[in-house]
Amino acid sequence: MVWITKVIYAMQQVSLPALKGNIMKTTAIIGGSGLTELDSLKILDEKEIATPFGKASSTLVFGELAGKKVIFLARHGNPHHIAPHKINYRANLWALKEAGAEQIIAVAAVGGITPEMSPARIAIPNQLIDYSYGREHSYFAEDSDAVQHIDFTVPYDDSLRSQLIRSGKGLNIVEMGVYACTQGPRLETAAEILRLERDGCDLVGMTGMPEAALARELEIPYVCCAVVANWAAGKAAGEISMDEIMQNLEQGMTDTKQLLQQFLANVA
């Protein structure tokens, strides 16, 4: 697929101009479990963007939030129906790039492993470990004219992370953490969580990869906004219940929407 490499290069040249002064960037928000739509978004248009990789999870919603241009994509579809391992990540990121996204905030529901990551809290991870498998994880997975290796030392964009953290003052945000991406859709065993903790992970989710790497391949600044829905397996007494998860997500997503509003109000 030599043409994929050439198309990505062309997309990078056209849609990544040098942004100077107070030119507003178009922010894409990827909504995860608990965030299939943005209530406060002033909707201007909705489009289904064709991609070489099939359909995205949902139509792209174009609008304004806090006076800034926003593109919203429901990662699991709207209504929520696509399992984490079945999401067409390549189509999702490609569609956002085609639509003009210049930075991405990816909202994701996660489980808390370490004590600081308590339910309903927001965390902005700075690192990740990928435990998923069998997913289409690269635009360069097929034959191309040259082997492509992206630098992924720091998986999330530092500048965008800093802006998001600064915008969350008063929301008790955890400013760092290691995100473990598991396969899903089942939740983990207590033994698996102990392994992740030994590996240095603070959070566990199912959608962080290959999403972050694909954004890096397309050269779109990307950051994860993780909302803790529950204690991970074995970190609290009893089984994990969906009622508990939904209750924590309701509070966490309320804070997340406030964070997004404050971020967009503060950025150029």
Image (tube, rainbow, N blue to C red):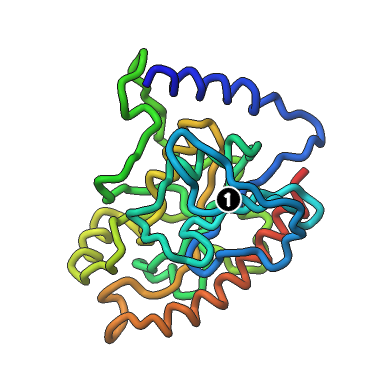
Q: Residue 135: where, in percent of width, then height?
A: 30, 45
On screen, residue 224 above or below 147: below
Residue topped by disc 1: 105
Front in this rendered view, residue 217 or 120: 217
Q: Where does the image place residue 257, in percent across and percent down from the top left?
A: 65, 65
Type of the residue with mark 1: Ile
The residue at the point 30 percent across, 76 percent down is: 235
Quarter holding the C terminus is top right
Give above or below for 216 relative to 173: above
| Residue lying farthest to the top in this orientation | 145
The x, y position of residue 200, in whole percent, is: 30, 55
Q: Height in image: 39 above or below 13?
A: below
Whether residue 95 is visible here, answered yes or no, is: yes
Q: Residue at x 37, y 27 (%)?
A: 140
Residue drawn at x 27%, y 61% is 197
Looking at the image, which residue is at 40% across and 31% down?
Answer: 139
Q: Secondary structure at mark 1?
A: strand
Report the front residue among 56 and 32: 56
- Is residue 160 rendered to the left or right of residue 137? right
**Horizontal side of residue 100 vs 140, given as left or right:** right
Q: How many discs mark residues in the rendered view?
A: 1
Classify residue 266 as left or right of residue 16.
Answer: right
Q: 45 or 205: which is nearer to us?
A: 45
User: If the image is split into quadrants, where does the N terminus sit?
Assistant: top left
Query: Would you say 242 lies left or right of 19 here?
Result: left
Q: Which image quadrant for residue 18?
A: top right
